[in-house]
Amino acid sequence: MILRQLFDSASSTYTYILGDEDSREAVIIDPVLEHWQRDSALLGELDLRPVTTLETHIHADHLTGAWWLRRELGCQIAVSARSGAVGADRLLRADDRISFGDRHLRVRATPGHTHGCVTFVLDDMSAAFTGDCLLIRGTGRADFQQGDSRALFRSIRDQIFTLPGRCLLYPAHDYRGLTVTSVGEERRLNPRVADAVSEEDFVGYMKNLNLPHPRLLDVALPGNLRLGAPADPSAERPGPKWAPLRFTVAEIWEIEPSALAEMHAQVQLIDVRSPEEFAGPLGHIRGARLIPLEQLSAKIAELARDVPVVTVCRSGARSAQAVVLLQKAGVTQAANLAGGMQRWTAERHPIE
C-alpha cells in the first residue's frame, strides 16, 4: 500500500493519501483547502486515482478541500452521518467499509471531540487514522461543538485502545513535529488516557485545559458543514488563468513546452543558464532574456510585474529554483518550463 502524510503548517493539520498499488485507487483523509492542488499534483505524480475523500470530523481550524477535489478529480466525499454536514455522497456509520482497490478502511465511531468524530482503521489493523480523537501523547479538546469528555474517554478506550498494540496511529494534528505513534505507546505513555488513568482523572484534566477557541472557528465550521463548497458553486477554479499550467508537489507552477509554443499572450522568458549554455548546442528560445540564476535575485526589480514570467534552463531544475526566488520576491505570475531546453528541443520546437 502507498501511504503519504502531508502537512499544513498554518493549522498543523495532517492530510493522508492511501493508495492501492495494483489498482492505483486512492482515498484522501482530511484534505485542507489551501493544499488541494498540492494533493492533486501528488496523486498525479504517483499515478493514483482518488475515489473518495474522507473527513474524520467537522474541523474548526481549517477549511476542507473535499469539495474542490470532488469537482476537479471526480472523487466522492464521505463523512459521518452524525456530523451534520450537507452535500456528501456518502454518510458513514460505525463499521462501514470504504474500499480503494483491494484495500479498505473500516469506520469506528469515536465521538467526544465532536459528535460526529470517526476513526478509520486499515483492513489489517496495522494503522488507524484517529482525527482529533486521539493525538500523540494527547487528545482532542471537548469543550465545544458537542464535545463530551466522558464520551471521548470511552471512545479512546473502547474503540482505539482495543486495536493491536502494534497498530500505528496517525492523528489529524500535531503541534510539536511528531508524526506517528502506536496503540501500545499511547496506552503506556499518554498522560491523559494511559491505562493507569481513570475516567474521573481524564474529566478533571479536560475541565482545566482553558484553551482559547480556534482562530478560524466562525469561518471553518459553516464552511466545513458545506464540505468546503464555496458560497458560489460556479466559482472559477483557483489558480493562474494566463496559461494552462500544472501545479507540482514542489508547490510551483509548470508549463508544458507545447503550451508555451502555442501561447499568443505576452510572457517574459527568463533563461537562467550560463552565457555559454545560452549560446551552446541546445540554443535558446526566441525572445528569451539571459539572466543566470546567481544574478536573478539582484535583477528581479527589472522585470515587469504585470507580465507573466516563464523561467528556462537545461532540464527544468535551476529554473524551478528561479520560480521559488521569484515567488519569494512577490512575483505572483511565474511558471517553470517543464523539462527545460532538453524537452523543448526534443519536441522540435524552434530555437535560436
Image (cartoon, helix red, strand yellow):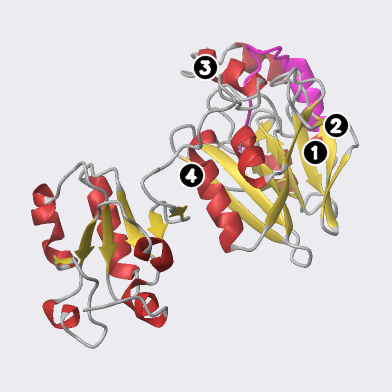
Q: Residue at x 38, y 53 (%)?
A: 252
Q: Residue furthest bottom?
A: 281
Find out whether the residues at labels 2 and 1 contact each other: C-beta distance under 8 Å. yes
Q: What residue type is labelled 3?
A: Val
Residues under numbered marks 1 and 3 in contact, where contact means CB atoms less than 8 Å apart: no
Question: Which residue is disc 4 drawn over?
Answer: 177
Local crowd size for mark 4, using a 10 Å CA cut-off: few (<14), some (14–19), many (≥20): few
For the record, the magenta segment spans 137-158
The percent coordinates of residue 232 (x first, y second) are 56, 21
Q: Is mark 3 on a helix, strand or loop?
A: helix
Q: Where is residue 307 in the image (x, y as percent from the top left)?
A: 22, 46
The C terminus sits in image quarter: bottom left
Picture layout, residue 232 above or below residue 305: above
Q: Which residue lies furthest to the front in this view?
A: 264
Q: From the image, tell me which residue sits under label 3.
A: 219
Question: Is 141 a magenta residue?
Answer: yes
> Residue, x 24% and y 53% (percent of image)?
325
State how far apart marks 4 and 1 are (Cα). Answer: 23 Å
For the residues bearing labels 3 and 2, Cβ distance under 8 angstroms: no
Q: Which residue is drawn at 48% across and 36% down?
A: 34
Which is more foreground, mark 3 or mark 2? 3
As drawn, 317 above or below 333:
below
- Sequence-first tag of 3 and 4: 4
Residue 349 visible to the viewer: yes
Instruction: Specify which label sits upstream in the sequence, 3 or 2.
Output: 2
**For the residue carrying disc 1, how many other residues have a C-alpha within 10 Å: few (<14), some (14-19), or many (20+)?**
many
